[in-house]
Image (cartoon, rainbow, N blue to C red):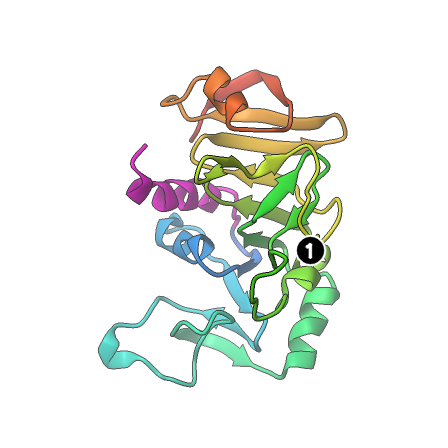
């Protein structure tokens, strides 16, 4: 698969996990593309940890308001009925379990559902942001990412980078397939038919369990 297609492909598949009425937090990067692929009959409320709900479409250059940006600093719009509030209220929503789904990327994720996505030792990082709270506070956690990083495994037996959270990831979606985190390990439930099972396993350090009901990616 051409690398230029991967982000849109993954975002389109993750969009199918979101249900009408969900309150959803989208991490920076690839997850911000997900609203572009939502069915017209699905209405979700997007929450931003820097203090508002009701994120709308990305504005064009003529309609950018420099005071309305998401947690990654990118300009966004706000839908009718949206609301602004302070950080304590925002994190009260997150820590109070009012976010149905959080979708974010990862540097590493492992077969136990551990997530490392905030720093690489020795490299300058801006901080963890709201990731730790979002991963623990949301009802469902989806990791949306490229399967490997320059050919190196990102889906591991055990994360080696500093963890964002332990045992919190529910679903992993990459350009190669969809994997559920289970007590037995990573269950491959959907496969991109451009790849074989052997190719997906070779790109994955963790041992994959192949579902008896394995289907093509939706």
Tag 1 secondary structure:
loop
Number of marks: 1
User: In this image, 163 relative to 204: left or right?
Assistant: right
Q: Position of residue 33 (x, y in %)?
A: 39, 54
Which residue appears at 35% of the width and 45% of the height?
8
Residue occupying image coordinates x 58% and y 31%? 179
Seen as rendered, the residue at the extreme front is: 122
Residue 64, quarter of the rendered image:
bottom left
Q: Which residue is mark 1?
A: 164
What x and y, as percent, mark residue 3? Answer: 32, 40
Q: Position of residue 216 (x, y in %)?
A: 43, 23
Residue drawn at 75 percent across, 44 percent down: 167
Is 13 inside the magenta-drawn segment?
yes
User: Which residue is nearer to you in this view: 43 or 218?
Assistant: 218
**Stretch in magenta:** 1-19
Q: Is residue 98 visible?
A: no
Q: Quadrant of residue 25?
A: bottom right
Q: Is residue 208 above or below residue 48?
A: above
For the N terminus, the image quarter is top left
Q: Residues within 10 Å of mark 1 (few under 14, many from 20)?
A: many
Question: Is 75 located above or below residue 190 in the figure?
Answer: below
Residue 107 point in image, percent of width and height: 56, 48
Query: In the picture provided, is 166 more to the left or to the right than 110?
Result: right
Q: Nearer the viewer, residue 143 or 80?
A: 143
| Main secondary structure along the magenta-highlighted residues | helix
Q: Residue at x 45, y 51 (%)?
A: 42
Q: Quadrant of the C terminus?
A: top left
In this view, 207 is above or below 25: above
Residue ranking furthest to the left: 62
User: Residue 21 or 55: which is nearer the viewer?
Assistant: 55
């Amino acid at each position: 698969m051409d690398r230029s297609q991967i982000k849109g492909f993954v975002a389109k598949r993750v969009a199918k996990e979101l249900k009408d009425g969900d309150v959803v937090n989208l991490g920076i990067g690839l997850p911000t593309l997900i609203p572009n692929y939502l069915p017209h009959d699905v209405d979700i409320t997007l929450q931003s940890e820097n203090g508002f709900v009701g994120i709308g479409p990305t504005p064009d250059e003529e309609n950018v308001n420099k005071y309305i940006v998401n947690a990654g600093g990118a300009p966004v719009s706000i839908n009718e009925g949206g609301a602004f509030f302070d950080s304590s209220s925002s994190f009260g929503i997150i820590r109070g379990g009012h976010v149905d789904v959080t979708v974010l990327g990862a540097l590493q994720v492992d077969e136990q559902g551990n997530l490392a996505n905030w720093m690489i030792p020795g490299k300058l990082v801006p901080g963890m942001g709201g990731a730790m709270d979002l991963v623990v506070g949301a009802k469902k956690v989806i990791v949306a990412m490229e399967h490997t990083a320059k050919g190196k495994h990102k889906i591991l037996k055990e994360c080696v980078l500093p963890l964002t959270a332990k045992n919190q990831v529910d679903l992993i979606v990459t350009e190669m397939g969809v994997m559920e985190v289970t007590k037995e390990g990573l269950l491959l439930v959907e496969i991109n038919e451009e790849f074989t099972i052997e190719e997906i396993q070779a790109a994955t350090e963790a041992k994959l369990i192949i579902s008896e009901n394995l289907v093509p990616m939706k």
